[in-house]
Amino acid sequence: MLQPDKILYEAEVTATGGRDGKAASDDGLLSVSLSLPKSLGGPGGPGTNPEQLFAAGYAACFLGAVKLVARTRKITPSEEPTVTAKVGMGPVAVGYALTVELKVQLPGVAKSAAEEVVAGAHERCPYSNATRGNIDVKLTVL
């Protein structure tokens, strides 16, 4: 199990009401309403859900790792790179499990070089390290 030598940052968020509730950070910067999607048997609604929040966090973190790896390898995309995280959830023998696909665009970068950058980012990203061995993460270079 990977453990950091020291903690550089901690986020603290409290959820109330479960999947049809709210979540807020202790510093007041995050405050969201949560709604259970219809596809999971809920009413839907205007709120977000844990899978969207996880996808947003993973995409942003992975993009940071992509940019770091590209910079260290002196690879400069012609436009701003993007990462789209697709997070799915479904039943397993006991409970539920997640799936993840990360779709990465590195405009103006040869596909082979982009694939090397993405592989390097997958080794460095804290979300990738947290999910490794638990969730099959599919990497797609567009």
Image: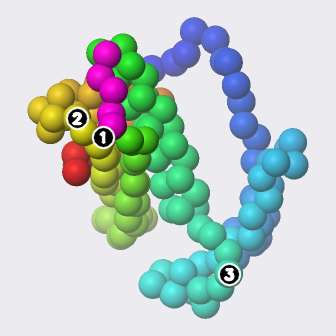
Between tags 3 and 1, which lies in front? 1
CA distance for labels 1 and 2: 6 Å
Which residue was labeled with disc 1? Answer: 106
Per the picture, the main secondary structure of the magenta-coloured stretch is loop
- Residue at the image position 36 percent from the left and 14 percent from the top: 72
* Residue 111 position within the rendered picture, expressed as x and y whole percent measured from the top left: 15, 38
**28 relative to 6 in the view: left or right:** right
Whether residue 9 is situated above or below residue 87 in the rendered picture: above
**79 and 114: which one is in front?**
79
Q: Which amino acid type is marked by label 3? A: Pro
Which residue was labeled with disc 3? Answer: 46
CA distance for labels 3 and 2: 38 Å
Say what secondary structure mark 1 lies in: loop
Say what secondary structure mark 3 lies in: loop
Q: Residues within 10 Å of mark 2 (few under 14, many from 20)?
A: some
**11 and 133: which one is in front?**
11
Q: Quadrant of the rendered structure where residue 5 is?
A: top right
Which residue was labeled with disc 2? Answer: 109
Q: Which amino acid type is marked by label 2? A: Val
* Residue 122 position within the rendered picture, expressed as x and y whole percent measured from the top left: 33, 31
Range shown magenta: 74-78
**77 relative to 60 in the view: left or right:** left
* Residue 81 position within the rendered picture, expressed as x and y whole percent measured from the top left: 39, 42
Q: Earlier in the sequence, mark 3 or mark 2?
A: 3
Which residue appears farthest toward the top when viewing the image? Answer: 5
Mark 1–mark 2 CB contact (< 8 Å): yes
Q: Which amino acid type is marked by label 1? A: Leu
